[in-house]
Image: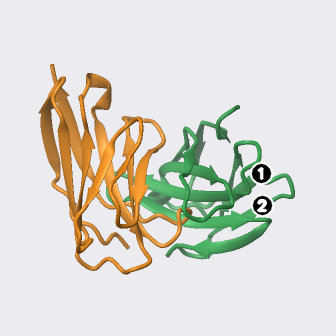
Chain colours: A green, B orange
Amino acid sequence: KAGVTQTPRYLIKTRGQQVTLSCSPISGHRSVSWYQQTPGQGLQFLFEYFSETQRNKGNFPGRFSGRQFSNSRSEMNVSTLELGDSALYLCASSLEVVYNEQFFGPGTRLTVL
Amino acid sequence: DAKTTQPTSMDCAEGRAANLPCNHSTISGNEYVYWYRQIHSQGPQYIIHGLKNNETNEMASLIITEDRKSSTLILPHATLRDTAVYYCIVATGANNLFFGTGTRLTVIP
């Protein structure tokens, strides 16, 4: 079974631009979560989608948004990029059972110049 | 927000058991303890989780104290490939995890 895939793997943008990252979960997984990882703040939860609905949200500004499609694939968007948005963005998927493991993708490395 | 306290770093000799402690004194009755690890430049990897009973799988054992205020992850025979940052997380749901700073485990040949 294929793992979680994320595209692109690397991205360079400039301040003020917007960016869209994509995540394809493991087949059969309906929950997709997004995380941001930076050296200063560590791994931080962004949001979780289940059946095309945002189910949980972390403490990030509204510039960070996401959506999930009917095939469970998910995208996250960051508008008006800031230097501090440079980070590794990780996507994780899991079965709909609540107390279960999450499978993480390799991440997208975003650099904002 | 992270509700756990872990040592910043630990060393372990290859082939020996690695015991990674975690304090979670404010854990609620419906919160599980999860352990993940992250090897450099990769996404985190699930290891194990538990509520109040000790748990074991092919990767590790999880020992939770009776009062549930602390736990220990045990890697029975550490190998060089176990060198990673290990995160202890308490959460009510598996899909919105709050990672702390973790413990950097270095397995020494």
Which residue is drawn at the image coordinates 17% and 52% (left, top)?
Answer: B8
Which residue is drawn at the image coordinates 63% and 65% (left, top)?
Answer: A48
Residue A65, image quadrant: bottom right
Q: Which of the two residues, A55 or A58, is positioned nearer the viewer here?
A: A55
Chain hosting mark 2:
A
Q: Is residue A47 above or below residue B10?
A: below
Is B47 situated left or right of B95 in this image?
left
Q: Position of residue A59 (x, y in %)?
A: 49, 75
Q: Position of residue B98 (x, y in %)?
A: 42, 65
Residue A60 visible in the current orientation: yes
Judge the density around disc 1: few (<14), some (14-19), many (≥20) Cα neighbours within 10 Å: many
Q: Which of the two residues, B95 or A6, is positioned nearer the viewer here?
A: B95
Is A59 situated left or right of A33 in this image?
left
Per the image, the residue denoted by label 2 is A68
Sequence-first tag of 2 and 1: 2
Judge the density around disc 2: few (<14), some (14-19), many (≥20) Cα neighbours within 10 Å: many
Which residue is drawn at the image coordinates 22% and 39% (left, top)?
Answer: B105
Tag 2 near tag 1, CB within 8 Å: yes
Marking on residue A73: 1
Find numbered disc 2 in the image and state the secondary structure of the residue it sits on.
strand
- C-alpha gap between disc 2 and disc 1: 6 Å
Q: Position of residue B29 (x, y in %)?
A: 39, 80
Q: Is residue B67 above or below residue A88?
A: below
Which residue is drawn at the image coordinates 23% and 70% (left, top)?
Answer: B66
Tell me the kind of residue under disc 1: Arg
Is B74 situated left or right of A11 in this image?
left
